[in-house]
Image (cartoon, rainbow, N blue to C red):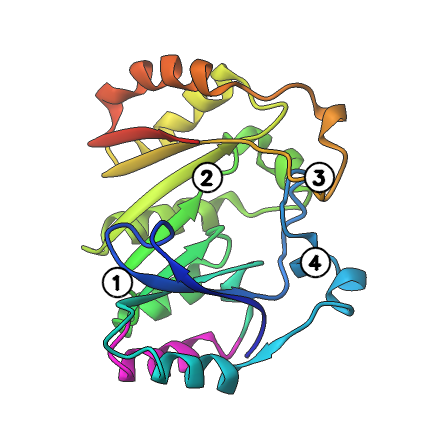
Amino acid sequence: MIFGGLQELTLIDYPGKIAATVFTIGCNFRCYYCHNPELVLPEKIKTTKTLSEEDILNFLKGRQGLLQGLCITGGEPTLDNCLLDFIKQVKALNFLVKLDTNGSNSEVLKNLLENKLLDYIAMDIKAPLAKYATVVGAEINPNHIQESIKLIRQSGLEYEFRTTVAPGLTTQDILDIVPLIEGADNYYLQVFHDNGKCLKDVRYFGRSLTAEELMLLKEKLVEHFMYVAVRE
């Protein structure tokens, strides 16, 4: 595998664990609010400094006993055909593995789960299904999204669903997401922050809900999930 970045230490990405995070290259979505265009757009990928699989594994070997887990994010990790073999090598070093995914490749997710290669899964719920293609800037198969949700919920693993409440997403949009994941263990509303390098100029998509508005919205959601929170 080829990676577009390594965060050597995170106390946030893997809840309750001391971890590192690796960023895979390539994505099948083109979310206008994406913070990492250098991992998504082919013309930017060409100029991105990369790390090899060997680089990452050697780093992990030097952190055994210090780090508990590895977060694999992107881009979209499930696009890489080498993902399963890479995770096997990470697990052989006795690290926990957290996967961040957009849920579009349910077959890959199923394979990872059947091989017991994951310990925590975070899936982004981008929008209500009726609005998905518009938000992600690509054609989607709703069945794959729904199947990934089902697989995650039935996995027996720790997991979370999360929605970055990007410009253009409304309170009603979030309420319309509820039927997709109702009863889930954990659902997070993430405040959107413009880092100045989003895929598109987000000003054209409308305003984003504030943290205060999301806190009020959270109160409407608490009865639908085991746990719901706002991440700022």
Spatial CA distance of label 4 from label 1 is 28 Å
Q: Position of residue 65 (x, y in %)?
A: 23, 76
Spatial CA distance of label 4 from label 3 is 13 Å
Which type of secondary structure does the marked residue at label 3 adopt? loop
Quarter the N terminus occupies: bottom right
Q: Name the residue carrying label 4.
A: 38
Quarter the C terminus occupies: top left
Spatial CA distance of label 2 from label 3 is 23 Å
Whether pointer 4 and pointer 1 mark residues with C-beta atoms closer than 8 Å, the reply is no
Indicate which label's residue lies in the foreground, 2 or 1.
Answer: 1
Which type of secondary structure does the marked residue at label 4 adopt? helix
Q: Amino acid at mark 2?
A: Ile
Q: Is residue 161 at least partly visible in the picture?
A: yes
**Magenta-tinted stretch:** 81-95
Q: Residue at x 49, y 50 (%)?
A: 102
Q: Name the residue carrying label 3.
A: 196
Spatial CA distance of label 2 from label 1 is 20 Å
Which comes sooner in the sequence, label 2 or label 3? Answer: 2
Q: Name the residue carrying label 2.
A: 125
Which comes sooner in the sequence, label 4 or label 2? Answer: 4
